Amino acid sequence: MPRKTLFAFILALLLAPPLAGGASAGQIKGTVKPQGLRSPEGVLVYLSNGPEVMLDLSGAKFVMDQRQLTFIPYVLPVPVGAKVSFPNNDKVAHNVFSLSQAKKFNLGSYKPGQSIEVTFDQPGVVELRCDVHQEMKAYILVLKNPYYALTDAQGNFAIPDSKLLAAHGIKGVPPLPEGKYLMKTWHEKLRGDRAKVEAPATGAADVTFRLKRGPSGVLYKR
Amino acid sequence: MSLETLPLVLPAKLEGRSMSHLLKFLAAIMVTVVFGLVAVSSLRAQNAAPPQPAPPKGPPLIVEGRVVSQYGPVKGAQVRLPGQSQMVLTDNQGHYDLKTTAPVMGRPMVTAGKAGWFNNAASLSWGGQAGDITLYPVFLQDDPSYQYYSPLVCFRCHGRLTRIWDQSKMAHATSNPLLLQMYYGTEQERLNGKGIAYKIAEPNSQGNCAQCHAPGAASDPKRSRDLDEILRSPLTTWDGISCDYCHKTRKVLPAPLSPSGFAPALVRQYPFQGRSILVFGPYSDVVTQPMAASYAPVFKQGEFCSSCHSHLKPLPAGNKWDPSKVYTPDEMAGFGIKGNTVLPVQTTFQEWKQWQDGLGPKDPNKGKRCQFCHMSWQKRLLPYDNYVVEGMAQHMFNATYRSPNDLHPHHFEGGTKNQLQNAVALEVNGKLDKKIFTVTVRISNTNGGHWVPTGETMRNMLLLVSAKSLEDKPLKLIKGPRLPAWAGRGDPAKGDYAGLPGYAFARVLADGEGNLNVPFWKATRIASDTRLRPKSTLKLEFVYQLTDPSDEPSAEAQLIYRPVVRPLAKAKGWEVKDIPVTAKAW
C-alpha cells in the first residue's frame, strides 16, 4: 500500500466515529395525502410507541389563544406535563372548558386581557369548548413523547419536528434512536391510520399516509 | 437608477457643491429609506392581521349631578355615559358621582335609567358638570287592541339586527309549515285534513298554539286564536314574534292559568310625546328618538323566555299518572309541578332554572342564562363594531360605542347542526379481554344549559354504535342497550335503526292505549325521559363477542339528531333529514 493511501485510510478511521456520531440522528419524514379536505395541513403524525424521555419544559411556552371567536391554533399538540396558557385576546368574555376524560376543567368566564394556565398531565385528546360561544372549538393533543409532528401546507412532516419543538421552546429532545416504531395519525375529520416504520441510524425513513374522511380515533389504545 | 450605479453618479452630480448640501442630500435619502421601510413594514403588518380597534379611552373625568322626577329625587337610577358599561347608582337624594375615563363622543351627555321610568339624559359640560336628569314614569296603561309596529319600521335604523332576526325561527313562527300541518293536519296547500293534528282531534277548539306562535294576536282577547285567521287578518303586521311584541314586555310574571305557567306583563301604548315608540330593553342609556326607551332588567334574565319555553298540561279531571317511574321528586319540583295530575310537556325554562339553582355560588357556570348562547356573538356576525345602530342612524345618534360584551345579536339559534355539534360531545374507548371486546361510549352535554334535546317532544337524538373485526366483519353485541322501536322499524340503510346497538335520547309522551310519541293533546303520561342533563356525561358499555382472541377489532359511535320522531314523520309523509352531530372511532 502506498504511503499516501495508508495515511488517508488511517485518517478516515480516526474521523469516522465522530462524523458518524454527528449524523446518527435518524429521522422519519413523509407526506400525508388526505381525501376530502381542502388542505393537508395540521394532521398530527406521532410515534405511539416512541421512547419516553424526560423533557426540559422549563422554557416551554404553549399558548391556546382566543381571538375573533376563534381558538388559535385549532390543534395544539403538547407533551404530557405541558402547561398551556389560555389568553383572552378577544373583545368579548370567554369561558374555556373541557369534559374530555384526558382533562376535565372549566375556567369560568373571563374578560379580554386576562389569561389562565392549565397543566395537561394525562395523554389523550382534549376537546376544548367555550361555554359562551358555541362555535368555538379546538383540540389539545397530549402526547406521551416528543416524537410528533404537524403536517405543513403541502402535507409534509418530519419527526422530530424541529420547528414545532423550537416554536414551543421544548429543549432536551434526544435524537430519535434507531429502531422500529408504530406511527399513527390523528385529525378531527379523518379516519386515523398507522404504519410500522424503521428509523435508520442515519438519514431518514420515508412514509406516505393516504387518509380518508371518517371519525377520528383515540391517540392511545390503553 | 440602480443601487450599483448610485456611488458613481453621486459625486458627479454633487461636484462643486458644499459639504452641507451633500449632508442634506444624504439625510434626505436616509429619511426616505427609513420612511419607506416603515411604510412597507406597516403594510406587511396590515396584511398579516387586521388591526383590532382598542377600546376607546379618554382623560379622567368626574361627572356629578342629580336624577330627579316630578315626585322628587330618584334613588337607584343607573347613571353612565352613553354606551359605557361603567355606571353608578344614585343615592337617596338622587345624587351621583361618576368617575370615568370613557371618551366623550359626539354631543357630550350623561344618561340615567331605572325600571319603571323612561330613560333620559342631560347635556354635559367639558368640565364634567351636568344639569339635572329628569325621569318620567312609565304609566302602566295596556291597550290589548294595540296594533304592533312592523319590523320594517325597526329595520330603518337596526338593519343588521333585524336581518339576523328575520332568519331566526322566532321571526316567522306563525307561518312555520310544520306548525300549520300539526295544527290543521293538512299538507302544504292545506287542502286535505288528514293525519295527526290538533284541529282534527279538537275541531271545536282553537287551542293555545297562538299564545307563543302568534303572541301579538293571542294577547288581544277580541281576536281569533285560529292560526289561519291570524295570518289572513289585516290586523296582523307580521307572521311571527316581532320586535315590537317582545319589546313591549315590562316583566314576566307567574300565571297559573297559562299553559307555560308564566305570562309577560305587556305595556302596549300608542306613540306619545310626538312620534316616540315605547320600547322596553336591557339598556338604561338609550335615549334616542323616536324610541321612548325604558330599562327592564328582565331582558337580561332567563325568565324572559319562560312564557313560551315551558308547557305544562293538566290532565282531565280524575286522571293521574306516576311521575316516580321517570323523574326524581327534585326534578318534578324543578318543573314546578306538585302531585301527579300535570304532565311536563315542554320544560326548557325549568330545566335551565333547576340546573342553575343547583349550582354553588362559585361554580363557573353559575349565572349562565338563555341569552348567553341563543343571543351570543357568532363568527358570521363579525366584525363587532356598529352592530346595533348602523347606516344613517350612526350619524343621527352620535354613533354610541358599545362594547360587544353588552350586545346580544338576535339570531336565537337552536336545534341547528352548528349548535348541536357544539352542544354535545362524544368519546369512545375500547378494552380487549380474551374473546370479549368492551366498547365504552361517553356522551356529554357540553354546552346545553337545558336537557338535550329539549323543547318540542318530537325531537330526539340517537346514538349508533358498531364494532367490527380486523377483517371488517361486524361483531355480535352480547350485552348493551339497543335502540327502541320508535327509532324506525325497517332497513337501517334507509334510516330505520330500531334494534341496533345504541341509545335514544328523548322525552316520550304516551297515551292511555300504550301508544308512544303521541302529541301533547293525546298524552296521558310520560313514558320515559332519557335526555342529557346540563354538563352531565352518560357512560354506556357495549360488549361484543370476538371469534378470534387475537383479533384487533375497532368500534365506531355516531350521534344523530332527528327533528321529528320517525313514526310521526312517516305518518305525516314528511321527509325529515337526520342531522349528523358527531362521530368517533376506536
Image: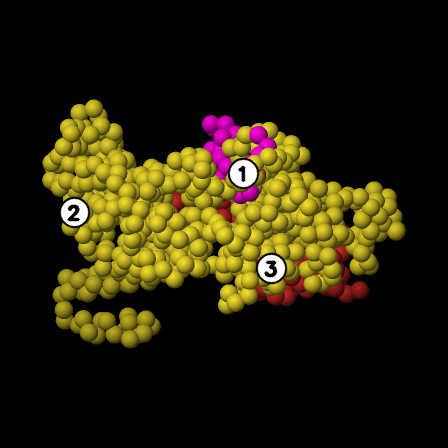
Q: Which residues are magenta?
A: B339-366
Chain of residue at mark 3 = B
- Magenta residue check for B242: no
How far apart are the two marked residues, 3 and 1, measured between alpha carbons? 25 Å
Question: From what the image shows, is residue B13 above or below residue A23?
Answer: below
The mark lying in front, picked from 2 and 3, is 3
User: Do the residues at discs 3 and 1 belong to one chain?
Assistant: yes
Q: Colour of chain A?
A: red
The crowding category of the residue bearing disc 1, from other C-alpha atoms within 10 Å (few below 14, some 14 to 19, many at least 20), is: some
The crowding category of the residue bearing disc 3, from other C-alpha atoms within 10 Å (few below 14, some 14 to 19, many at least 20), is: some
Callout 2 amino acid = Gln
Q: Where does label 1 land, which residue?
A: B314
Q: Which secondary structure lies at badge 3?
A: loop
Taking the spot 62% from the left edge, 56% from the top edge, the residue there is: B568
Q: Where does label 2 land, which residue?
A: B273
Q: Which mark is residue B195?
A: 3
Where residue B540 appears, as percent x and y from the top left, is 71, 42
Q: Which chain is yellow?
A: B
Q: Is residue A70 visible?
A: no
Of the image marks 3 and 1, the number of the one nearer the N terminus: 3
Where residue B228 appears, as percent x and y from the top left, is 44, 59
Chain of residue at mark 2 = B
Where residue B412 appears, as percent x and y from the top left, is 44, 51
